Amino acid sequence: MKTQYAVIDNIEVPIENERNLLELIRKAHIELPTFCYHSEISVYGACRMCMVEVQGRGIVPACSTPVSDGMVVTTSTKQIREMRKMIIELLLANHDQNCTSCPKSGDCKLQRIAQKLGISKVRFKRRDEFPEPDLSSVAIYRDPAKCILCGDCVRVCREIQSIGVMDFANRGAKAFVTPCFNKGIGEVDCVNCGQCVKVCPVGALTPRRQIDEVWNAIHDKSKKVVVQIAPAVRVAIGENFGFDPGEATTGQLVTALRMMGFDKVYDTSFAADVTVIEEGNEFLARLEKGEKLPQFTSCCPAWIKFAEQYYPELLPNISSCRSPQQMFGALCKDILTKDMKISREDLVVVSIMPCTAKKYEADRAEFSVNGNKDVDYVLTTQELALMIKERGIDFGRLEIGAFDMPFGFKSGAAVIFGTSGGVSEAVLRYAADAVGGEAFTEYKDLRADSGVKITEVTVGGKVLRLAVVSGLANARELIKRIKSGEESFDLVEVMACCGGCINGGGQPISDDAASVKARAKGLYDNDKMLQVHSSQENPYMQKMYSEDLNKHKAHELLHTKYIVRK
Amino acid sequence: MGPATTKLNYTYAREVLDKYGRNPNKLIPILQDIQAEYKYLPEEIMSFVSSDLGISPSSVYGVATFYTHFTLEPKGKHVIKVCDGTACHVKKSEGILNALEKELGLNKDNKTTKDMMFTLETVACLGACGLAPVVVIDDKVHGLMTPESTLELLESIRREESVNG
C-alpha cells in the first residue's frame, strides 16, 4: 500500500498508526502546547492549546482530530498564536498565581507554557476569591485555587484506576473539580496512588510534603535518623539532575543522604528480601493446603485500600505480609533500638518512596506502637530531589557511596520489586529453590510491558498459574474474571500504578512513556549486577532469622491484618 | 425529612432504582424521581444510588450540581422564584427580590426560612419576558409584579397556611 503523508509546517510527514493529529505533529518534532492530552487516557479536548490550522477545515484541536492522507497543517499562525496567549491569560486570571510558594514551581506546565509563549502581562482582572487548600489527606495536597479544569485527574482516576474520586461539579464559571459532596480527598474512596498528582499539569494536586519535619529530625541532636530507599527511587531520581531515565544513581543517592545528615543509609530492598521469604513461605503453605488461593500480593498500599473498600471478601486471600517499607520500619524499631541502645522515640525512620500511598500506609494505626510510628516520615522521590537541591549538593558529581550494613544488603530479587512483575519473579525464585532446589532463572514473561500478564511456570514439578496486573482498572477486570470462574490462578500480583512503583505518583514528573520503560530496564540491569539474585541467598537473612527473629517475633513484626472499609 | 424517615428514604430509593432497572444511563430520571419524593437529594441517598448503579459518587454529585433543577438542600414548602433575566432585571426585579429577602429574613447564602416554609431563588430567564418582571410561586407564574403585589401574594399564602395549619 502506498504510504500516506500529511504536510506539517511545509514538511511531508509519513502517516503510520498515529491515533490523532497531535501525535503526528509530535513525530514531526514539534512540541504543541497542551494541558489535557495524555496518551494513556481518553482524549478530552478541554484546554484548546493544541489548536492548529488544517487547510480547508480551519482551526481544529489537534488532539481530537484524526489524521488523513494529504492533510496540510500549519501549527502556528498569527491567529493561533494570539488564541493560545489569550487562553493562558484567561487561565492565569482564574489562578492564584502564587508561583514562588507553589510546590509545583519549576515543574508546572502552566508556568512553562506561559513563559514559552512570552506572556508578560495578563489583561484580565484576577478572580477575587480563591478556595482554601484541602489538607484532609496525609498523602495528597489538593489546592483547588490552582486548578485549570483540564480534567486530567478526573480521567486518570476513572479510566486507569476505575475509582473516580473526583469529578466536575457545578457548571460554567462556577465549575470546579472536587471529590464527591465537596469533601476532602482524604475523606473519600481515594486510595492515595497519586496518579492524579502525576498527571496534574499545575500545583492543584501534589504530594503532601514532609520535608520540614525531616529536616527538623535531622537537626535534632537527640535523635538518630535512619533512612531507607525504595528500589524504584534509584532509577528515577537522576532525572532531576540531568541523568537519563533508568540510569541508576544509587551510589550518588547514598552519598547525598549522608551529606544531608542521616545517621544510617539503608535499603528498603533488604526488607523486600524479608518479604520474599515471608510471602514465599505463606504461598507454599497455602499451595500445600490448597486454601486461600489465589494468593494476592500485599506490597502496594493503594491496592490494599482498594481491596478493603471494594473486595472485603478477598482480604483473606491477600498475603498477610506487611509491605517492605513497614517491615523495614518494624525491624529498625526493634533490632536497631537494641543495637543502638536507644528508645523507639529517639530513633527516627525516614523512607524515600516513589509513592504517595506509602505516606498513608505509614500513617495507618496498626503500624504504630504506643503512638510511635514504625516509619516516622515518608518522602517521595520528588521531595528528596528538592531537599538535595535545597542543600546545594551537586548530585551529578558525587562520589559513589555504599549502604550501611546489615540493612543495606540485598539480593537482585528485592531490587526488581520496583517494577510490575518483580514481586512475582522474586517469590518464584525463592519458591523454586525451596521446593525443588531449582537454580535461579529469569522469568521473562513476567517482564513484558503490559498491564495484564498471565503466565504458567513449573515449580517443583507443579504447574502454577500467575497473573500480574498493574493499574487498578486492570485489577478490577481480572478480579471479575476470577470471581466468575472464567480464570483461576495460584498467585496474583497487583500494583496500583501502571508498570509498578517505577511509575508511582511520587516519582519525577515525566511526560514520556519511554522513561517508565527505561526505569524498569534500570532495575533489571541492577539485578544482574548484584552478587546474589535470590532473597534466600542474602547472608544477612539467615543471620537475622537465627539471631533476632523467632517465629512469634517474625509474626508480630512482619505481618498485619486488613480492615473492611465497604 | 429528618432522621425519623431515613429508613423510608432507602426503601423509596430502592423502588426507584428497580423501576429504572439499575441502569446508570438513567441517572437523571432516577434523581428526578428521588427529588420529587423528598424535595431534595440527600447525600446518603446519592451515595446509595451511586454504589447501586456502579458509578462513582463524585459523578453523581457532578450531575446533581450541574442542573439547577436539582437541589442538595431541603427546600421550604413553598418555592418562590424571582426571574432576574435581562428583561426582568431592567423592569426592576431586584426590588422584588430585596423586598422578599427583607420580609423573609433571607439572603444570598441563606435561601430557606428556618420554619422550612419558604425558599427564595433567582432564575436566569423563564421565557416569559413579555410579563416582566415575573415571579413564580410553587410553579404558578405571576407576571407584571411589583414589590408590593409580591408581598401581598406572600401574605395570602401565609394566611392559607395558618388556616390549614
Image (spheres, rainbow, N blue to C red):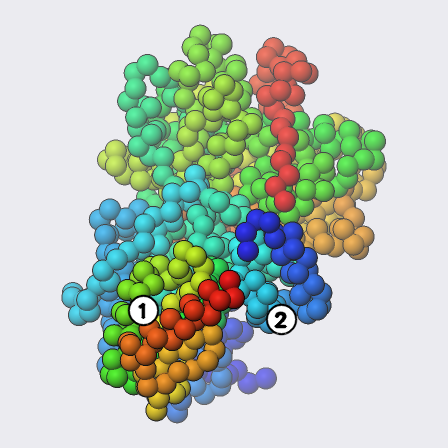
Do the dots labelled 2 and 1 sit on one chain?
A: yes
Q: Position of residue A2 (x, y in %)?
A: 55, 85
Question: Image height check: is A129 above or below B79?
Answer: above
What chain letter is assigned to the residue under label 2? B
In the picture, measured across the screen, residue A156 lies left or right of residue A382, that is right
The residue beneath circle 2 is B26
The x, y position of residue A200, in whole percent, is 40, 56
Q: Amino acid at mark 2?
A: Lys
Circle 1: residue type: Leu
Query: Gap in Å between the C-alphas at discs 2 and 1?
Result: 37 Å
- Disc 2 or 1, which lies upstream in sequence? 2
Category of crowding for the residue at label 2, using alpha-carbon neighbours closer than 10 angstroms: few (below 14), some (14–19), many (at least 20): few
Q: Secondary structure at mark 1?
A: helix
Residue A237 is tagged as none
B100 to the left or right of A184? left
Residue B142 at least partly seen: yes
Q: Position of residue B47 (x, y in %)?
A: 57, 55
